[in-house]
Amino acid sequence: MRRAIALDDGRIEAITMLMNATDDAITFALPGPSADRHLLIDSAQPDLEPVAVGDNYEVQPHAAVLIRWIAEQTGE
């Protein structure tokens, strides 16, 4: 699930939530565009500080993850 808003400076901020209800880890390919992404919360690693995330993220069994990304607006 992803929610996005336009920021005052014209960039787009989105929050992506990944959920894994299975007994195995799942690697998710994050939706485009490829942008500056940071992990906000990983329920499997609650003490983890926000870290940069690439185009894929592995979600552990029975966990949920929130990732924030900011991108330049590409058009109107």
Image (cartoon, rainbow, N blue to C red):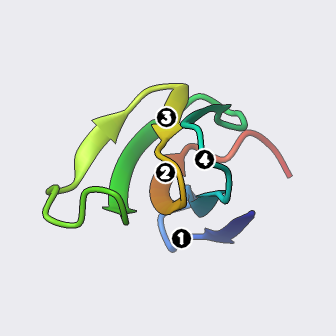
- Residue 51: which quarter of the image? top left
Image coordinates for residue 68, horizontal then vertical, percent:
46, 58
Looking at the image, tell me whether mark 2 or mark 3 is earlier in sequence order: 3
Q: Which of marks 1 and 2 is in front?
A: 2
**Farthest residue toward the right?**
76
Crowding at mark 4 (Cα within 10 Å: few <14, some 14-19, many 20+): few
Residue 15: give its label: none
Image coordinates for residue 34, horizontal then vertical, percent:
59, 28
Q: Which residue is drawn at 54% across and 27% down?
A: 56
Mark 2 and 3 residues: CB-CB less than 8 Å, in contact?
no
The residue wearing badge 3 is 58
Give amino acid for label 2: Ile
The residue wearing badge 1 is 7
Q: What element carries label 1?
A: loop
The answer to whether residue 60 is above or below residue 3 is: above
Q: Residue at x 63, y 69 (%)?
A: 6
Image coordinates for residue 4, horizontal then vertical, percent:
68, 67
Give amino acid for label 4: Asp
Looking at the image, tell me whether mark 1 or mark 2 is earlier in sequence order: 1
Give amino acid for label 1: Leu
The answer to whether residue 66 is above or below residue 61 is: below
Q: What element carries label 4?
A: loop
Q: Is mark 3 on a helix, strand or loop?
A: strand
The residue wearing badge 4 is 23
The answer to whether residue 29 is above or below residue 17 is: above
The residue wearing badge 2 is 70
Looking at the image, tell me whether mark 3 or mark 1 is earlier in sequence order: 1
Work out how far the residue at label 2 is from the one at label 4, CA to CA, in angstroms: 31 Å
Q: Nearer the viewer, mark 2 or mark 4?
A: 4
Looking at the image, tell me whether mark 4 or mark 1 is earlier in sequence order: 1
Q: Which residue is drawn at 16% across and 56% down?
A: 48
